[in-house]
């Protein structure tokens, strides 16, 4: 008998028939003798609909009330799945974030899980009851509902798996694993049997939509076995522990000497901000990023130009496009303290990243990227690097071309059938 956490995304929960299909898949695990907890997302498109309501109500909405609204989607699917399981003859009940409880900090809309109280949950599972848990949500010390950010149900699933010491965490999505890039852009992209925690962390952080970044970081920290699977394989598909999905594993399980680049990711949800004529003096850059940090806005690529015009410089950086309005507001409020000239922003950009642990032992990865893009006339607006990643910012209209030519340049294309 194994203890399993099964997580189902929005497309898997998109309507009653699909929820019944999920219930049948869960029932098979129960009948195999496993203890099962299920974490669910809202129905596909539901969170976007709820976010839209918030934006219609106010462009500068209260994040605490935003969380109350958007957490409703997962509450609905958790209750519906529990009903479907009961109808299928499986003992089940839903557990909302505040009922376990799942404790988080108070960074509303981007909360982080602290601890999960599991005594009641484990007792229920030991009695043969399937626990159905809404992903994406928790409760702050003030007793307010919190949400974990888009894709937060992945983090909920990994956190629950770690808390109950599950044997594995199966993430069911609308794809059957992790690919070298988006197969919709490159039909010859290859599915990867294994990806290291570190690579998956980088891929998720730079645009790969399979797993949320924080879920991968938590899995690496807690050593949770994570498998990415498709929920659309049919009722007669093999059990999850025999399906050919993608395993997220430690680096020791992969031959990094043979694998230079693991994957290429793209992200159009970026906005570029430039502050002109910033004073070139100690503390000037800190004055830019302190108000952004106070507003819980993540900054990515940062470029400071060489000083010009007698002691002033330009500073360019990127933020998530969803945070652009709040970023501009925070910077304008701090304009006197920063002392910049103009505030320019651009949302028509995309970030392209190549990722692979093999970079540690191979030279020339960045050179190949820059040469390949240059040969196709693609201009690079910004660059950032890590030990296993190189990212560039380009015009969004050139995204698909960049992904295709880089995929070929690094030898990632699958053999023709």
Image: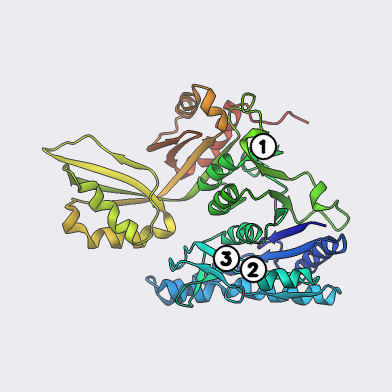
* SS class, disc 3: loop
Q: Reading the chain from its start, which is encountered first: label 3 or label 1?
A: 3
In front of the other: 376 or 212: 212
Camera-near label (1 vs 2) is: 2
**98 to 158, vertically: above or below:** below
- Between marks 2 and 3 in the image, the one whose residue lies nearer the viewer: 2
Which residue sits at x=84%, y=56%?
234
Which circle's residue, 2 or 3, is located before the other in the chain? 2
The residue that appears at 39% across and 70% down in the rendered structure is: 59
Whether label 2 touches label 3, CB < 8 Å: no
Distance in Å between CA atoms under marks 1 and 2: 41 Å
32 sits left or right of 334 in the view: right
Dot 2, crowdedness within 10 Å: few (<14), some or many (≥20)?
some
Of residue 349 and residue 292, the one placed in the foreground of this image is 292
Choose between 346 and 15: the one closer to the eye.
15
Determine which of the numbered discs, if any, sits on residue 136 in the image: 3
Residue 202 located left or right of residue 332: right
Q: Which residue is mark 2?
A: 118
Q: Secondary structure at mark 2?
A: loop
């Amino acid at each position: 008998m194994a203890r399993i956490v099964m997580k189902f995304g929005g497309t898997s929960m998109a309507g009653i028939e699909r929820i019944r299909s999920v219930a049948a898949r869960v029932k098979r695990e129960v009948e195999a003798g496993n203890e099962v907890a299920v974490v669910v997302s809202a129905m596909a498109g539901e969170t976007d609909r709820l976010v839209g309501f918030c934006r219609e109500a106010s462009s500068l909405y209260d994040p605490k009330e935003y969380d109350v609204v958007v957490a409703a989607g997962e509450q609905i699917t958790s209750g519906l799945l529990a009903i479907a399981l009961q109808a299928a003859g499986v003992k089940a009940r839903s557990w909302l974030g505040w009922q376990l409880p799942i404790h988080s900090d108070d960074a509303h809309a981007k909360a982080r899980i602290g601890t999960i109280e599991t005594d009641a949950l484990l007792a229920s599972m030991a009695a043969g009851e399937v626990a159905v848990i809404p992903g994406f949500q928790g409760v702050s010390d003030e007793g307010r509902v919190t949400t974990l950010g888009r894709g937060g149900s992945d983090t909920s699933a990994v956190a629950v798996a770690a808390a109950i010491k599950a044997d594995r965490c199966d993430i069911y999505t609308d794809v059957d694993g992790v690919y070298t890039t988006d197969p919709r852009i490159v039909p010859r992209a290859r599915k990867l049997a294994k990806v290291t925690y570190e690579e998956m962390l980088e891929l998720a952080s730079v645009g790969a939509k399979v797993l949320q970044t924080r879920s991968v970081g938590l899995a690496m920290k807690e050593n949770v076995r994570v498998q990415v699977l498709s929920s659309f394989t049919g009722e007669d598909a093999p059990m999850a522990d025999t399906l050919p999905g993608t395993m997220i594993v430690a680096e020791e399980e992969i031959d990094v000497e043979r694998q230079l680049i693991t994957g290429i990711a793209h992200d159009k949800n970026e906005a570029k901000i430039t502050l002109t004529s910033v004073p070139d003096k100690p503390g000037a850059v800190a004055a830019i990023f302190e108000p952004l940090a106070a507003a819980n806005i993540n900054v990515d690529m940062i470029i400071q130009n060489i000083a010009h015009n007698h002691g002033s410089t330009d500073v360019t950086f990127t933020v998530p496009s969803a945070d652009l309005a709040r970023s501009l507001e925070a910077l304008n409020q701090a304009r006197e303290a920063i002392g910049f000239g103009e505030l320019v922003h651009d949302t028509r950009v995309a970030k392209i990243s190549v990722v692979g642990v093999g970079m540690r032992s191979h030279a020339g990865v960045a050179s190949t990227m820059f040469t390949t893009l240059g040969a196709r006339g693609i201009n690079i607006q910004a660059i950032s690097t890590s030990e296993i990643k190189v990212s560039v910012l380009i015009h969004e209209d050139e995204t698909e071309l960049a992904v295709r030519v880089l995929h070929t340049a690094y030898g990632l294309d699958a053999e023709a059938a």
